[in-house]
């Protein structure tokens, strides 16, 4: 008989021996007519090999998701009236002037005639607001150089020739700045509100400028490398102060957003003086056929967020009247010359929930959904262990 020492050392001449659970050779088990497990035999009560999963995280996660969904469902519907209290006729002009023609000097006269022809025809004697696209007039509408100011006044008068007393033209245009009254020192991409005779009622200067399109970043360095702006012109545009609301006599308060400024959620209106409608002239001819539908969709989102209708005027489409719920009331498609005759839709009588709190609300809801989803996924993972 082997001694206890030999058993402890595991050297009996037949290889190592194991203490504790015994191993039964498969051949012996087969001869005995039984199917013994290959692994260690364990006696005693069964124990769990993984953590015990509690149902509490899953229940809390599901409740959070249901709660967020209920909040979204129970939020008050839009307060935008179906019909405006005041009928304000408007005309949007879409001249279908492409980027390849817009800045050609020999095309300027033809473009001006097309704008005038589309603006002058009337279907009734009712007064109206007239809307033209971004940079519809390629010559400066204001020029601080003493020798050029009269020519800018002539351009304004010619542009406003189709409106009557009590009517106004809202158009994109350019202002040239001069520090010494003789040389150009900068420019602004602007929206002009013109009265009959070309009188400037007000002007809005674009605040969100396009790098390399409206100004050249690090100009000394880039110029030394031979780089220039992608758009015509050598002078950089200067940025305006941001969203403003302008009172148009007899027509109400208008907010102005130029081109892609309309995509900045929560930054399209003056919160201290909310407008009754937003005018968004744009030149979407830069972006082929895929850009204009996306730009229109962004404008619709801003209208729904703020409960404020949006008027869009573009040179090649898509021009549109958008109501305060984000619905397209009327539109003029891509590459069509024409007009939209309609009315300014009603705005919400007070700021919407988004108008009061901005992107805080959707961000909180998104955070709640993310936390709930992560906790729920973690609960199912532990359940499978």
Image: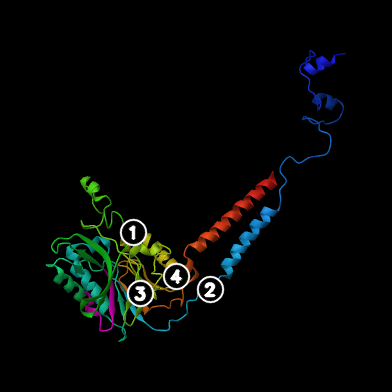
> Element under label 4?
helix
Q: Position of residue 184 (x, y in %)?
A: 17, 60
Q: Is residue 203 left or right of residue 107?
A: right
**Residue 335 picture quarter:** bottom left
* Observer-nearest of 52 and 339: 52
Q: Earlier in the sequence, mark 2 or mark 1?
A: 2
Evaluate if marks 2 and 1 touch, with contact meaning CB atoms under 8 Å apart.
Answer: no
Residue that carries the numbered disc 1 in the rendered image: 287
The image shows residue 97, relative to residue 252, as above or below, that is: above
The image shows residue 118, relative to residue 35, as above or below, that is: below
Give the colour scheme of this rendering.
Answer: rainbow
**Nearest to viewer (mark 3 / mark 2):** 3
Residue that carries the numbered disc 2 in the rendered image: 77
> Element under label 3?
strand
In this view, the residue farthest toward the left is 147
**Nearest to viewer (mark 3 / mark 1):** 3
Q: Earlier in the sequence, mark 4 or mark 3?
A: 3
* Observer-nearest of 292 and 250: 250
What is the CA distance from the residue labelled 4 to the residue labelled 3?
13 Å
> Element under label 1?
helix
What is the CA distance from the residue labelled 4 to the residue labelled 2?
13 Å
Residue that carries the numbered disc 3 in the rendered image: 254
Mark 2 surroundings: few (<14), some (14-19) or many (≥20) residues within 10 A: few
Residue that carries the numbered disc 4 in the rendered image: 306
Q: Position of residue 219 (x, y in %)?
A: 24, 50
């Amino acid at each position: 008989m082997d001694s206890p020492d030999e058993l402890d050392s595991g050297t009996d001449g037949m290889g190592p021996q194991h203490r504790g659970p015994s191993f039964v050779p498969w051949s012996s088990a087969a001869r005995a007519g039984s199917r013994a497990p290959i692994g260690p035999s364990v006696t005693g009560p069964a124990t769990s090999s993984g953590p015990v999963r509690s149902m509490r995280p899953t229940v809390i996660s599901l409740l959070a998701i249901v709660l967020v969904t209920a909040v979204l469902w129970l939020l008050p519907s839009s307060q935008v009236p179906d019909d405006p209290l005041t009928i304000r006729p408007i005309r949007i002009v879409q001249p279908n002037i492409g980027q390849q023609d817009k800045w050609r000097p020999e095309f300027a006269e033809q473009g001006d005639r097309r704008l005038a022809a589309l603006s002058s025809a009337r279907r009734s004697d009712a007064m109206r607001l007239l809307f033209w696209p971004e940079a519809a007039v390629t010559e400066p509408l204001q020029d601080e150089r003493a020798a050029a100011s009269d020519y800018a006044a002539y351009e304004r008068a010619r542009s406003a020739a189709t409106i009557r007393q009590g009517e106004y033209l809202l158009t994109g245009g350019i202002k040239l700045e001069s520090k010494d009254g003789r040389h150009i020192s900068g420019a602004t991409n602007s929206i002009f509100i013109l009265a009959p005779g070309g009188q400037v009622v007000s002007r809005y200067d674009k605040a969100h400028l396009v790098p390399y399109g409206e100004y050249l970043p690090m100009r000394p360095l880039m110029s030394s490398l031979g780089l220039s702006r992608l758009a015509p012109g050598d002078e950089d545009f200067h940025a305006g102060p941001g969203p403003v609301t302008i009172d148009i006599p007899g027509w109400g308060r208008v907010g102005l957003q130029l081109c892609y400024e309309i995509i900045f959620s929560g930054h399209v209106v003056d919160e201290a003086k909310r407008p009754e409608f937003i005018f968004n002239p744009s030149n979407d001819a830069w972006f082929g056929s895929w850009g204009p539908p996306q730009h229109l969709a962004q404008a619709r989102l801003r209208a729904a967020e703020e409960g404020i209708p949006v008027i869009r005027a573009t040179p090649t489409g898509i021009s549109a009247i958008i109501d305060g719920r984000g619905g397209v009331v009327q539109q003029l498609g891509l590459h069509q010359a024409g007009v939209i005759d309609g009315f300014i839709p009603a705005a919400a009588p007070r700021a919407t929930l988004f108008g009061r709190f901005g992107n805080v609300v959707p961000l909180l809801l998104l955070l709640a959904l993310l936390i709930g989803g992560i906790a729920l996924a973690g609960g199912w993972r532990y359940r499978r262990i």
